[in-house]
Image (tube, rainbow, N blue to C red):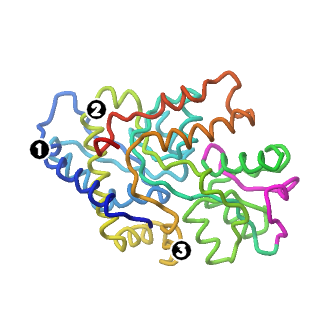
Amino acid sequence: MRTTRRSLLAASVALACIGALATREARADDPKEIRLDWATYNPVGLLLKDKGFLEEALAPRGIKVRWVQSLGSNKALEFLNAGAIDFGSAAGAAALVARINGNPIKAIYAYSRPEWTALVTRKDSGITKPADLKGKRVAVTRGTDPHIFLIRALQGAGLTERDAKLVLLQHADGRTALDRGDVDAWAGLDPMMAAAEIENGDVLFYRDAAANTWGLLDVREDFATAHPDLVRTVIAAYERARAHALANPQALSAALVAATKLPEPVIARQLERTDLSQPAIGAAQAQSIKAAGTALQQAGIIPAGTDVSASVDGLLDTRFNPVAGQ
């Protein structure tokens, strides 16, 4: 996990705000509870859940916190669209596609800049590049960053989804299918991808860190409009968890080990490719997501008439950035 003195200092600034946010009195329009997802691909959110920082901040207002597990961006976005949760963890490009398709969400916080996806195969499969996937069975979770990564990788090889045989599975099931030989390759997601490397000797045969879009915390747009102060409280609690993660990497590792039941070396591999130093929404996220959106439009996933740039601008909401000036 990459850390910097600047990121530690920036995270500590948010901690000073938590006391003020937590002591605000309850309001008549306060919800009875706030519902958030937790996911093994969102280490900061997982630590936030374990440490109870948000519960502590909301207790003076009598607001409860309910946690719901998301198994992938697709599930988090489904939960948001259905109103089952108020805040959800998703990859930036997946959130863009969801918003274009009518899911009324805003991206308000970058919980990580990960290299959390790559194309994975068994060491004896003979597959060494995306072009080798023509006619092959590939496990993928539709509507997630690994799916979008696969589309872009195939596109770069002059192929489309139709040239491969996609097998639609949730991420963990995709890894299992690869191990069993039911598929030839898998569009992987950490920490399952790290486990496949370390435990089975599987090969990440195609990597492109720049094509991984950011891990973003999304909020239902109507919730943000009705309760902007509570959105700020959630962000402040996230910042407290991020500061704790940067200052106590072993605590972060332990939380992931407990949640995933995976050994420490696997979690260490996941955290090696997870940057927690850039939480504010801004130009970096916009650039990455627009590049993915343009590729998806060229592949026919996003309608040709869509203004991708405007859609990205509509997704990203900088009002709640935790550090002024970023």
Relative depth, front residue between 164 and 71: 164
Element class at badge 1: loop
Relative depth, front residue between 79 and 301: 301
Q: In this rendering, would 265 be left or right of 307?
A: left
- The image shows a total of numbered marks equal to 3
> Disc 2 and disc 1: Cα gap in Å?
16 Å
Mark carried by residue 228:
2
Q: Main secondary structure of the magenta part?
A: loop
Element class at badge 2: helix
Q: In this rendering, would 22 be left or right of 96?
A: left
User: Mark 3 is on which residue type?
Assistant: Val
Q: Is residue 142 magenta?
A: yes
> Disc 2 and disc 3: Cα gap in Å?
38 Å
Residue displayed at 26% across by 51% down: 54
Residue displayed at 60% across by 48% down: 145
Q: Residue furthest top?
A: 305
- Identify the residue under disc 1: 23
| Structural crowding at the residue carrying mark 2, measured as other residues with C-alpha within 10 Å and reported as few (<14), some (14–19) or many (≥20) | some
Q: Earlier in the sequence, mark 3 or mark 1?
A: 1
Element class at badge 3: helix
Location of residue 256 (image quadrant): bottom left
Q: Earlier in the sequence, mark 2 or mark 1?
A: 1
Range of magenta residues: 125-144
